[in-house]
Image: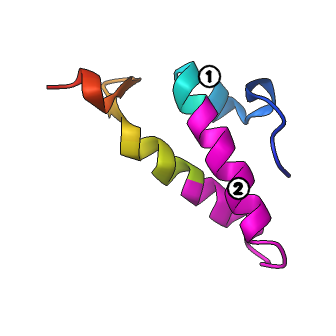
Amino acid sequence: MPYPNNNSLPPPVRDHLPEHAQDIYRAAFNHAFEAHVGDPRQEEAAHRIAWAAVKRDYVKVGPRWVARSDVD
């Protein structure tokens, strides 16, 4: 199911990612979800793609996710 806003994201995403990373996750998930209509693993694929999109711009440092541009 597509997410209409960041408040509707799953708790592991909403509670741990910065707001901009949540925006990236939600946009990537919604796009991938629509692109995989008819796939029995549609939601699983959309979550994997969304996490990959976040990891392009963010990295986990300790317990926090930070923008790659802020890491040496």
Q: Is residue 37 above or below residue 23?
A: below
Q: Position of residue 34 (x, y in %)?
A: 79, 63
Q: What is the magenta range?
A: 23-49
User: Residue 69 lies in what quarter of the image?
Assistant: top left
- The residue type indicated by label 1 comes to Asp
Q: Which residue is mark 1?
A: 15
Tell me if I can see residue 70 in this picture.
yes
> Which of the two discs, 2 and 1, labels the residue nearer the N terminus?
1
Taking 71 as reference, is 27 left or right?
right
Q: Which residue sits at x=38%, y=38%?
A: 57
**Residue 16 found in image quarter:** top right
Q: Measuring 86% from the left and 52% from the top, which residue is drawn there?
A: 1
Element class at badge 2: helix
How far across and down, in percent of the image, does residue 51 sit? 52, 48
Q: Nearer the viewer, residue 65 or 67?
A: 67
User: What's under tag 2, amino acid-wise?
Assistant: His
On-image quarter of the C terminus: top left
Q: Is residue 25 above or below residue 64?
A: below
Direction from residue 17 to residue 59 in the image, left or right: left
Where residue 31 is drawn, which disc sits there? 2
Query: Relative to 18, is 12 above or below?
Result: below
For residue 16, say whether it is visible. no
Would you say residue 37 sits in the magenta stretch? yes
Q: Magenta part mainly helix, strand or loop? A: helix
